């Protein structure tokens, strides 16, 4: 304090009384605003949805349950009847399985492609680096509905690519457009910018001396990636995995436009059940199912992030 | 053959005394072309990546200038601009353009008012429960979108908000909460404390420090968040389809109908129109998007 008083103007302004209290509480209050919005528009609906799937149609669930052409209502307490019913529906298990494998395939494919591009950007110089750096961001510029449409017209049988191949003399090539493989293609295409941006940022933050030191120790390029770059870019990779997996589980547009009608991903299935078939309870069950699948990834992300925060705080 | 000519020209060099003479740009163009060819030969991977990303967009854009284009022609059999006039004068379509912009502006504003003060608090202050609060907000992104909208619908029915303007604003601004909080929080956190202290030492008030030091330094992050939020609202097709239809049909929602029931070239024209705002806005933010501002927003500080 004495050093501070010696320098005029150095003393920090401290407000006492009510204003001081308000100033101290202000950040927490400001932070609470989006938190409350989240609790009301995410937390509450999720609780309501879970209760509805267990047969509770009272309270805030009542207006929605009145739309249902078919639902299972608990007479007293809760029931698993609706869950038993939906697992017995033809095609449902197939849709569930499709959702799972498309999610895993899209996430793995994206991480591999994004790492390859990010590594190229990290180590390449000149012309190639400039081209790839402007290439990978292109999908950001295109709205999801548009890119899905562009991709499906390109990849489908008798589509644009088939036309080009035909002109080149290839008349009978089978293309993936309209299948769930093309849904994976669409997801990779759409997510390349996000994946590369995050992983490339992680790779840029690896200090060059680390890489040089490994090289001096005559480590191979693969060794450098595995032992120096990968551990330091683990967090961004995990962020990418989480966001892509959760995003895929919750996507409607890409499978709706690019995918087949059967088997279809749960995102499309639940939207149809809700809006077309008048089965909000089935839709809510599918919603809860994708929530459960997403939790696996989100927990991973939160744990990695809090570990990182702790590491930074210890420093 | 071309290579040898170009090389001999390079060797002979420009006439003495005109180092920046007329032949320089032409020679540079040749050098670039030569380099590009050699590059393509050596970098099949990059060429494939380019085709994978650009070819579908290119064929879609070409389709907007076609009268008809059917398999197996590799290019339109007849060119025409007639679909542009048709799309622009179809009543429902121009209305959907208006609606999209209106919703995007309102939802982004709502989100900014709710989230930016919080972003400042998260980035700049220490207080109890900060991490827990940020994690709660992250829950918006932790739930798969379409599932969340389905769950949200029951609440919107209960509140009589299904099919209303406010209902669509809720859905659209909800999807931007994480972007609008986490990315600016990252930028606020990155403002060096000593700069603020220096300003305070010269006698500036807290508000003045915020306005003249903190805010300008955090502006890239805020700009990125606002632009990304605006675009995500403009492009939002899943929740708006569920909540807004049939009263509010925005451009992306309109696309579903177009794909099913309009001729290909008309859909292509509409696609080009719908892509334009994204291209313009992202070019504005380009500098900040790729300097790590975005990446920093997904990590806690």
Image (cartoon, coloured by chain):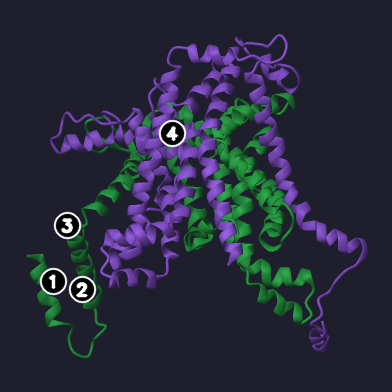
Chain colours: A purple, B green
**Dot label at residue A60:** none
How packed mark 1 is, by other alpha carbons closer than 10 Å (few <14, some 14-19, many 20 or more), is: some
- Chain ID of residue with mark 1: B
| Alpha carbon distance from label 1 to label 4 | 48 Å
| Alpha carbon distance from label 1 to label 2 | 8 Å
How packed mark 3 is, by other alpha carbons closer than 10 Å (few <14, some 14-19, many 20 or more), is: few
Residue for point 18% across, 65% down: B34
Mark 1 touches mark 2? (CB < 8 Å): yes
Mark 2 touches mark 4? (CB < 8 Å): no
**Dot label at residue B6:** 1
- Which residue in the protein does label 4 denote? A254
Give whichever of discs 2 and 3 has the lower sequence position: 2
Give whichever of discs 1 and 2 has the lower sequence position: 1
- Which residue in the protein does label 3 denote? B41
Is B145 on the left or on the right of B6, as rendered?
Answer: right
In the rendered image, residue B268, in percent from the top left (x then y), is placed at 40, 37
- Chain ID of residue with mark 2: B
Q: Nearer the viewer, mark 2 or mark 3?
A: 3
Residue for point 80% across, 57% down: A26
- Which residue in the protein does label 2 denote? B27
In the depicted view, which residue is nearer to us: A78 or B294? A78
Instruction: Confirm whether residue B94 shows in the render.
Output: no
Residue for point 63% across, 11% down: A72
Please tell me whether mark 3 sits on a helix, a strand or a loop. helix
Is B33 on the left or on the right of B120, as rendered?
Answer: left
């Amino acid at each position: 304090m004495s050093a501070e008083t010696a320098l005029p103007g150095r003393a920090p302004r401290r407000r006492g009384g009510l204003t001081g209290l308000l100033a101290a509480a202000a950040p927490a209050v400001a932070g609470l605003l989006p938190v409350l919005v989240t609790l009301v528009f995410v937390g509450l609906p999720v609780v309501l949805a879970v209760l509805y799937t267990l047969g509770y149609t009272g309270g805030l669930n009542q207006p929605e349950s009145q739309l249902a052409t078919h639902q299972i209502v608990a007479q007293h307490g809760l029931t698993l009847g609706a869950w038993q019913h939906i697992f017995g529906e033809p095609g449902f298990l197939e849709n569930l399985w499709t959702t799972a494998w498309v999610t895993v395939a899209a996430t793995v494919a994206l991480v591999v492609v994004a790492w390859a591009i990010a590594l190229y950007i990290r180590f390449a110089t000149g012309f190639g680096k400039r081209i790839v750096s402007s290439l990978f961001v292109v999908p950001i510029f295109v709205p999801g509905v548009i890119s899905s449409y562009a991709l499906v017209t390109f990849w489908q049988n008798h589509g644009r690519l088939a036309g080009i191949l035909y002109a080149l003399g290839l008349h009978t090539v089978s293309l993936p457009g309209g299948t769930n493989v093309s849904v994976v293609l669409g997801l990779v295409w759409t997510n390349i910018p996000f994946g590369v941006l995050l992983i490339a940022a992680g790779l840029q933050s690896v200090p060059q001396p680390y890489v040089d030191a490994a090289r001096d120790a005559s480590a191979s390029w693969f060794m450098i990636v595995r032992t120096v770059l990968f551990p330091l870019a683990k967090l961004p990779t995990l962020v990418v995995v989480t966001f892509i997996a959760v995003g895929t589980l919750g996507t409607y547009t890409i499978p709706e436009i690019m995918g087949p009608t059967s088997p279809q991903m749960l995102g499309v299935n639940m939207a149809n059940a809700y809006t077309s078939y008048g089965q909000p309870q089935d839709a809510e069950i599918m919603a809860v199912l994708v929530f459960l699948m997403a939790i696996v990834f989100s927990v991973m992300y939160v744990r990695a992030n809090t570990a990182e925060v702790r590491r930074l705080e210890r420093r | 053959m071309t290579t040898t000519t170009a090389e001999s020209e390079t060797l002979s060099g420009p006439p003495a005394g005109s180092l920046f003479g007329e032949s320089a740009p032409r020679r540079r163009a040749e050098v670039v072309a030569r380099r590009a060819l050699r590059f393509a030969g050596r970098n099949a991977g990059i060429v494939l990546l380019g085709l994978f990303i650009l070819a579908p967009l290119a064929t879609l854009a070409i389709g907007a200038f076609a009268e008809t284009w059917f398999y197996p022609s590799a290019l339109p059999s007849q060119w025409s601009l007639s679909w542009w006039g048709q799309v622009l004068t179809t009543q429902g379509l121009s209305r959907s353009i208006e609606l999209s912009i209106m919703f995007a502006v309102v939802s982004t504003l709502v989100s900014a008012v709710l989230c930016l003060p919080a972003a400042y608090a998260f980035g700049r202050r220490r207080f109890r429960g900060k991490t827990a609060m940020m994690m709660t907000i992250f829950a918006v992104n932790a739930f798969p979108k379409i599932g969340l909208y389905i769950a949200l619908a029951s609440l919107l029915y209960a509140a009589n908000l299904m099919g209303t303007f406010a209902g669509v604003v809720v859905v659209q601004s909800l999807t931007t909460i994480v972007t609008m909080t986490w990315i600016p929080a990252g930028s606020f956190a990155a403002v060096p404390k000593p700069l603020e202290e220096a300003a305070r030492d010269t006698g500036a008030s807290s508000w003045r420090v915020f306005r003249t030091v903190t805010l300008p330094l955090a502006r890239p992050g805020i700009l990125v968040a606002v632009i990304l939020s605006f675009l995500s609202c403009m492009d939002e097709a899943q929740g708006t389809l569920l909540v807004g239809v049939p009263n509010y049909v925005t451009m992306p929602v309109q696309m579903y109908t177009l794909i099913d029931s309009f001729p290909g070239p008309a859909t292509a024209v509409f696609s080009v129109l719908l892509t334009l705002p994204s291209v313009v806005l992202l070019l504005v933010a380009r500098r900040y998007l790729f300097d790590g501002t975005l990446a920093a927003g997904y990590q806690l500080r």
